[in-house]
Amino acid sequence: MKKIVLIRHAKSSWEHQVSDRDRPLKKRGLNDAKLVSQAFKTNDFEPDAVFSSPANRALTTCKIFMENLNIDLNRITIVEDLYDFGGESVVNFLKGLHDGYENVMIFGHNHAFTSICNIFGDTFIDNLPTSGLVVLKMNINSWSDLSKGITELTIFPRDLK
């Protein structure tokens, strides 16, 4: 059995003249990431590995979650393949994970994450919102066998307000 927790980065700001990779979070994004991570904390999930896109907005979201879940920030691995908007690089990354990992958390971007939720989960998600969290559970022993599983949990900021 394998579990993936997908978290889309929090709401980012377009106020700054920076590259896409360097865009920071808006205040709303910071608040929503805290809200969702606190709600997820009640699930007592312990990841074997945590991976984040190198984009500032994804990595900042990841750090907020790690702090609120009391997970050492040194456990974050930055992965270039997670800076993907279509999904193919993310799927290839997941299929290449070490089979010793049962539970992984990944932080990244849309439309990749919405697509992955719909391809591998059993609940249709029209659009994974910023700070949105989805847990997918698959009955597989090897990540290379990634296949359709169940959508075990969704937490969206709008549902917590």
Image (tube, grey):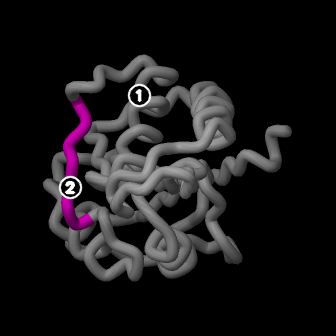
Give the extent of the magenta segment.
75-81
Q: Name the residue under label 2.
A: 79
Coordinates of residue 33 in the picture (x, y in percent): 59, 38
Q: Distance between the residues labelled 1 and 2?
A: 16 Å
Please tell me how crowded label 2 is: few (under 14), some (14-19), or many (20+) other residues with Cα within 10 Å.
some
**Residue 56, percent from left and from top:** 36, 47
* One can see residue 4 in this view: no
In this rendering, would 100 be left or right of 154? left
Query: How many labels were placed on the picture?
Result: 2
Front-most of residues 60 and 154: 60
Residue 53 makes an appearance in the image: yes
Q: What residue type is labelled 2?
A: Val
Report which residue position mark 1 lands on: 66
Where is residue 161 shown, x and y percent of the image? 85, 39
113 versus 64 height, above or below: below
* Image quadrant assignment for residue 75: top left
Quarter occupied by residue 121:
bottom right
